[in-house]
Image (tube, coloured by chain):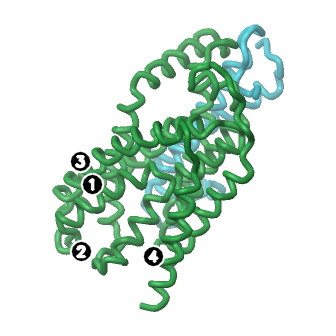
Chain colours: A green, B cyan
Amino acid sequence: MILAETVITYAQAIILGLLQGVTELFPISSLGHSVILPQLFGWDIHQNDDYFITFLVATHLATAIVLFLFFWKDWMRIFAGMGRSLRDRGIAEDDTDAKLGWLLVAGTIPAGILGLLLEHSLRSVFASARSASFFLILNGLLLFGAEALRRRAPQTADDDDTRIARQVGFPQAFFVGAAQAIALIPGFSRSGATMAGGLLVGLSHKDAARFAFLLATPIIGAAALLKLPELIGAQGDGIRGQALVASLCSALTAWLAVKFLMKYFETRTLIPFAIWCVAFGLFCSIYFAVT
Amino acid sequence: MSSKHPALTWAAVVVGVLLIVVAVVYWIEPASSLPSFFPGHEAGSGHHHVKHGIAAFFVGVALLVYAWFQTGGDKKTEPSAS
């Protein structure tokens, strides 16, 4: 058995935690960066080993908790709306909280099923720094493509959730949710895929980001909770301290990232993230090819 | 059962209940004891396919919720509409 403390130091845990919080929410692939950076820095971390996956699970759980707390009031309204719709056996035309809640369910189901069924095989096949670099380039091109093909969002005076509920239908929510599954491949970004999907169905950048973050919360949280017993059990021996430190770092940067992005997308686009993905992916591809 | 699409609603109920039963089977039976037509069946394996069970359970519940909305009043917008 590999002793985690011999391969993940506390300094590395802090760096990986800070990185995870930012890259999970920025549309630049957290998994891709978590796979590439240790290789780039020459760290002897084996991304396919169970202890590393368990370590990442802790940081993901922290990110999910931060997202849930950030949108706490929205979630309470959404849960109340869903409760009303179940009681009334239908969604009232003006009940945007209920509509948004069921849109999130419609988007989470395909992502959850694809994630449960494909996660292990996809991750083990593609979890190398070289392939992650290549897919990072493709992620950048996907973001460029979404910007090029996006539909102009209608200008309305409605609040955020009302705009989303009016603009997105259940088939579109299903499509946007299913797009999250692409993030099982290291290098592709979950939030990038959902924001791109949101833009393609006619949401503004701000609404696409908001929908992406709401959609990400249950799927990241559930995936982390499913793996949590491994962190508590024997597989977490020698890694719990590092995982706790990394989770705290991840929570801090995730909070700052979501706060920044909700402001950023009021006026700006995915283009800088697309440029980063293509440039960093190209650099890493060349670096790994020559070293 | 009053519904806008009775056949679809009944199908959702039947498949939903079946999937919840399938989920329970996945949770309590090891891979070797699963029926051979179940995805994940593997002779001699003691592994429990918990994730398969979770996936089946949630899809089953989603289908029951769909049926629940379909049998509601006409004044609401059911989730199947876009």
The image shows residue A181 at horizontal and vertical percentages of 58, 53
* Direction from residue A121 to residue A257 in the image, left or right: left
The Cα atoms of the two marked residues, 4 and 2, are separated by 21 Å
* Comparing labels 4 and 2, the label whose residue is closer to the camera: 4
Q: Chain of mark 4?
A: A
Is residue A71 placed above or below B74 in the rendered structure? below
Q: Reading the chain from its start, which is encountered first: label 4 or label 3?
A: 4
Q: Nearer the viewer, residue A18 or A175?
A: A18
Label 4 belongs to which residue? A129
Crowding near the residue tagged with mark 2, few <14, some 14–19, many ≥20 C-alpha atoms within 10 Å? few
Q: Chain of mark 2?
A: A
Q: Are marks 4 and 3 in contact (CB under 8 Å)?
A: no
Label 1 belongs to which residue? A231
Q: Nearer the viewer, residue A92 or A149?
A: A149
Disc marking residue A248: 3
Is residue A178 placed above or below A80 in the rendered structure? below
Q: Nearer the viewer, residue A180 or A124?
A: A180
Element under disc 4: helix
Residue at left offset 76%, top offset 28%:
B82
Label 2 belongs to which residue? A2
